[in-house]
Amino acid sequence: MPHERFQFTGSEGQQLAAALDTPDGAIHAYALFAHCFTCGKDVLAAKRIAVALAAKGIAVLRFDFTGLGSSEGDFANSTFSSNVADLVRAADHLRQTRKAPAILIGHSLGGAAILAAAEHIPDAKAVVTIAAPSDPAHVTSLFKDSVEDIRKLGTVEVSLAGRPFRIKREFLDDIAEHGLMAHVAKLHKALLIMHAPADDTVSIDNATKIFVTAKHPKSFVSLADSDHLLTGKRDAAYVADVIAAWAERYIDPVTTEAAADLGEAPRNVVVRETRNGKFQQTVTVGPHQMLADEPVAAGGEDSGAGPYDFVLAGLGACTSMTMRLYADRKSLPLERTTVTLMHSKIYAEDCAECETKAGMLDQIERVITMEGPLDAEQRKKLMEIADKCPVHRTLTSEIHIVTKAAD
């Protein structure tokens, strides 16, 4: 599955490390995943679920919360509220660069954070919690022997999963203020609760409380024989299978009609490094995704079309489409159009029609083949129409390109 790593700006200005797992084919929906307390985006459960969902057409964004993994900042300065705010920023980033997440997924404390963040992510239609506590303060049970010292001293280093973490009094104060059930009661989104009956970290009573508080539509799936961290590979695969099947009922499917509607208005083209090889990029246009690369001779891996290939493809597609529209409108017997293009550099002095007379110029050769019983006059008219395609006009007119840094 294609896998991209990048950064986005968190709620406190830090750069947060993110990973986006995407399908090999069309993307049916985007999901946002929140990992468990102190875990990180690359914890086995998060990674396995994301990859499995991508295989089913759902792209998944997961990221390290402040001070964890490869994200900037000090974990000690993070709070439950800051995690919630960062989830909202992650959803904003997806909305701006791809498409807003339709599915929100949270594991353990990440599940509680997802429930709190959901009301601030209006595009999301479905929410999934996995082994989530009904109260964020439940996390204090992991360092209960240190709670009194934290309140007295202000900050104390505790050991969690064999690693040292500093916990501040502000963290305790923040989670104590969160009434999570109030968020659950007004969720207004489809909710799937997944929990293992024998979870000895977050008891299943938490799932019961969330389920009873939530309004319909709501569902519960028992993760029999699973542990809290879903360390079994089959458990993560099962979770992904259930999420994909359940969410299909609540998210808007990608249809031909919807795709046609999108085509009527300009769409953002998002190009992002995959960091696989020297030059490989993903090119995303609405629900469509392609790879861009350079040939092996230029230092790439030839895993996708090159930049100039995309320019030629745009001109060729626009040429053929424009000719088709005209032929259909005029009832011309045009059966098929084939456009073959090549880009090269020429000396300006060799171009009699060009205004520039010195140096080198870009030249695009376009050869058009028209099939069908067309007469000479019809062929001549169609060739004239080819030069009127919008991309042709753009390439032969003055172009103003505005470049600015992302916020």
Image: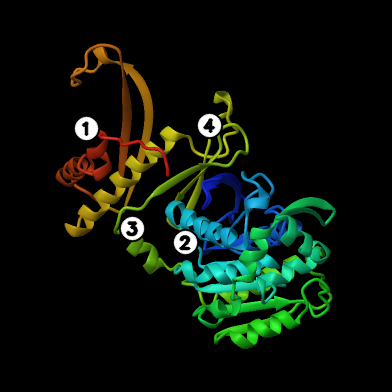
Q: What whole-number distance in Å separates the C-alpha atoms at marks 2 and 1?
A: 34 Å
Name the residue carrying label 2. 100
Given the image, on which type of amino acid does mark 2 rest? Ala
Q: Sort mark 1 into few (<14), some (14-19) or many (20+) by Cα contacts within 10 Å.
A: few
* Residue 238 rendering spot, x and y as whole percentages: 73, 71
Q: Which residue is mark 1?
A: 398
In the rendered image, the vertical position of residue 111 relative to residue 357, given as above or below? below
Label 4: which residue? 294
Disc 2 vs disc 4: which is toward the camera? 2
User: What is the spatial separation of the Cα atoms under label 2 and label 4, in whole angstroms?
Assistant: 30 Å
Residue drawn at x 71%, y 61% is 37
Q: Which comes before the other along the chain, label 2 or label 3? A: 2
Among the two numbered marks 2 and 1 on one chain, the one whose residue lies closer to the N terminus: 2
Cα gap from disc 3 to disc 1, whole angstroms: 24 Å
Whether residue 274 is situated above or below residue 217 in the rendered picture: above
Please say if 25 is above or below 17.
below
Mark before the other along the chain sequence, 3 or 1: 3
* Mark with earlier residue (4, 3): 3
Point 59% across, 31% down: residue: 278
Sequence-wise, the earlier of marks 1 and 4 is 4
Q: Which residue is mark 3?
A: 263
Where residue 399 sits, quadrant-wise, is: top left
Q: Dot 4: few (<14), some (14–19), or many (≥20) neighbours within 10 Å?
A: many
Q: In the image, which is nearer the foreground, mark 1 or mark 4?
A: 1
Q: Position of residue 33 (x, y in %)?
A: 61, 62
Is residue 58 in sight in this rendering?
no
Q: CA distance from mark 4 to mark 3?
A: 28 Å
**Disc 1 on helix, strand or loop?**
loop
